[in-house]
């Protein structure tokens, strides 16, 4: 039987080699993935999330923008090659007005996150960070699911700076399953991660690029509008 560890290594082989190659060539930038997710959520409007993930000198950078009615969520996440957050910025806007902004910096084994609300309220929280064992997770940003596989571990620490929560994340490989994108089947591998009792099901291609995400507890399903290129 194929183990979770071997599936993780297989799914990440190409993406991690890109990271290693980028770290050895100064100022070299490579696009790992970019595209758009079409998202449906129980009781909510249809949503779209555009994103780009790239490698620059050994760091992985992901930017995304979620559009949901009059709400916009923009993010910029930088991690090392194992997915440990180095820098993170998040901005949530309703009808063009900022309702929350977050800035987080990872340094000396800690992630310090500062949140600011519209009325000038601020809060700061620190989270311990272990190399290769910490990932960020946010239900509103499905493209960040990509980072779940980078640590190549079945147990990690998940941090959600927006809700100021953290907890153990348990990852397991379900097996090979195809996903329908644009009416065509795309070969993929199904994984499941559980954080705080909530499961997130996701499918990736052979390069670790996310094809589909489902969070059954909130009725969320996200599928790419077209296969990765």
Image (cartoon, rainbow, N blue to C red):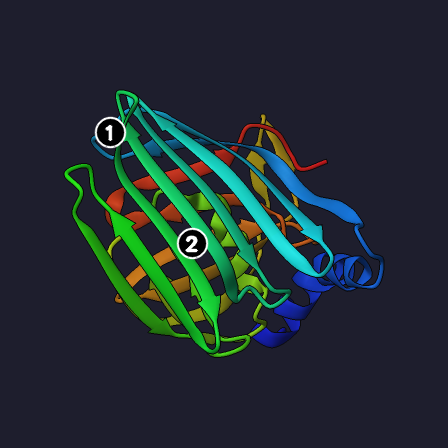
Q: How many marks?
A: 2
The disc label shown at residue 201, or none:
2
Element marked by disc 2: strand
The disc label shown at residue 155, or none:
none
Q: Which part of the image, by quadrant, shows the C terminus?
A: top right
Q: Is residue 42 above or below residue 129?
A: above
- Residue 44 is situated, as x and y percent measured from the top left of the image, at 24, 29
- Residue at left 76%, top 46%? 30
Crowd rating for badge 2 (residues with CA inside 10 Å; few <14, some 14–19, many 20+): many
Residue at the front extreme of this rendering: 120
- Residue at left 53%, top 58%? 147
Apparent side of residue 171 relative to residue 100 in the rendered image (left or right): right
- Residue 201 is situated, as x and y percent measured from the top left of the image, at 42, 54
Element marked by disc 1: loop
Apparent side of residue 93 relative to residue 153 in the rendered image (left or right): left
Quadrant for residue 198, please give it.
bottom left
Quadrant for residue 159, please give it.
bottom left
- Residue at left 65%, top 50%? 205
> Along the line of sight, which residue is nearer the eye, 223 or 187?
223
Q: Is residue 66 above or below residue 174?
A: above
> Along the line of sight, which residue is nearer the eye, 185 or 209?
209
- Residue at left 35%, top 42%? 140
- Residue 129 is situated, as x and y percent measured from the top left of the image, at 43, 75
Q: Is residue 96 above or below residue 179?
A: above
- Residue 92 is situated, as x and y percent measured from the top left of the image, at 31, 36
Q: Which part of the image, by quadrant, shows the N terminus?
A: bottom right
Crowd rating for badge 1 (residues with CA inside 10 Å; few <14, some 14–19, many 20+): few
> Along the line of sight, which residue is nearer the eye, 138 or 26?
26
Q: Is residue 103 above or below residue 155?
A: above
Point out the tag, 1 or 2, that comes first from the N-terminus.
Answer: 1
The alpha-carbon separation of the residues under discs 1 and 2 comes to 20 Å
Query: Can you identify the residue that label 1 sits on?
Result: 44
């Amino acid at each position: 039987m194929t183990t979770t560890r071997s599936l993780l290594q297989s799914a990440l082989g190409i993406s991690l080699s890109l990271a290693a190659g980028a770290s050895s060539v100064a100022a070299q930038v490579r696009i790992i993935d970019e595209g758009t997710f079409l998202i449906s959520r129980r009781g909510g409007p249809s949503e779209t999330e555009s994103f780009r993930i790239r490698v620059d000198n050994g760091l992985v950078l992901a930017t995304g923008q979620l559009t949901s009615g009059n709400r916009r969520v923009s993010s910029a996440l930088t991690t090392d090659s194992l997915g440990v957050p180095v820098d993170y910025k998040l901005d949530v806007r309703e009808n063009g007005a900022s309702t929350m902004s977050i800035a987080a910096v990872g340094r000396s084994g800690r992630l310090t996150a500062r949140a600011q609300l519209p009325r000038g309220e601020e809060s700061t929280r620190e989270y311990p960070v272990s190399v290769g064992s910490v990932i960020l997770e946010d239900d509103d940003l499905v493209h960040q699911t990509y980072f779940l596989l980078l640590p190549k571990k079945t147990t990690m620490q998940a941090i959600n700076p927006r809700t100021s929560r953290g907890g153990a994340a348990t990852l397991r490989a379900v097996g090979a399953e195809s996903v329908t994108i644009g009416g065509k089947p795309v070969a993929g591998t199904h994984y499941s991660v559980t954080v705080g009792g909530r499961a997130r099901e996701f499918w990736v291609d052979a390069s670790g690029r996310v094809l589909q995400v489902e969070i059954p507890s909130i009725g969320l399903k996200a599928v790419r509008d077209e296969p990765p290129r």
